[in-house]
Amino acid sequence: LTVAMAQWQPRFWSLPVLARTTRNVAAFYDMSTYARNVTTFERALAKGTAAFADGAAPYAAGLMNYYATHTPIDEANVRAKVDVLLSARYNATVRHVGVWTTPMPADWWPHLERWHRAR
């Protein structure tokens, strides 16, 4: 079982409560991290990983790979987000990464592989 959650509905999605729900859950995917820019991504990531910091429940960050116009998000954007994921602040808590949609831009693969190898 995977659970998609969002920080924009705190009455419905209580991250601290979800973080204590570990039975039969493979991962909690934080839809709030599906963000265009790195600043918004990191802000959502900070809040999400804080709720899951004890590591009992598996936290997953999402990477948005296309804009609403169906234009791929550029390689520099994913590189910066993967750098954030690999930073000491987040690396221990983020266990999975989800990608918003397919097809995956080809220039994203090396960055996702870099994150995966560092795990």
Image: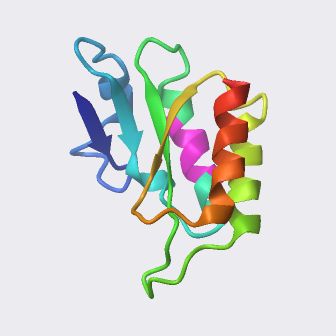
Q: Describe residue 35's horizontal placement relative to residue 11 as left or right.
A: right
Which quadrant does the C terminus fall into? top right
Q: How many marks?
A: 0
Which x, y percent locates residue 30?
A: 41, 44
Q: Nearer the viewer, residue 21 or 77?
A: 77
Question: Farthest front residue?
Answer: 106
Q: Describe residue 28's horizontal placement relative to residue 32 as left or right.
A: left
Q: Nearer the viewer, residue 112 or 58?
A: 112
Q: Measured along the vertical axis of the image, is residue 74 above or below residue 87?
A: below
| Residue at image point 64% right, 32% down | 116
| Residue at image point 40% right, 18% down | 57
Which x, y percent locates residue 9?
A: 29, 53
Q: Describe residue 35's horizontal placement relative to residue 28 as left or right.
A: right
Bounds of the magenta segment:
42-48
Question: Farthest bottom residue?
Answer: 69
Which quadrant does the N terminus fall into? top left
| Residue at image point 64% right, 58% down | 108
Is residue 39 visible in this depiction of the protein?
no
Q: Measured along the vertical axis of the image, is residue 10 above or below residue 35?
A: above
Within the magenta stretch, is there residue 43?
A: yes
**Residue 3: quarter of image:** top left
Q: Measured along the vertical axis of the image, is residue 68 above or below residue 101?
A: below
Is residue 45 visible in this depiction of the protein?
yes
Which x, y percent locates residue 23?
A: 24, 11
Which x, y percent locates residue 10?
A: 31, 46
**Residue 103: quarter of image:** bottom left
Within the magenta stretch, is there residue 102?
A: no
Magenta residues: mostly which secondary structure? helix
Q: Which of 97 and 107 is in front in this view?
A: 107
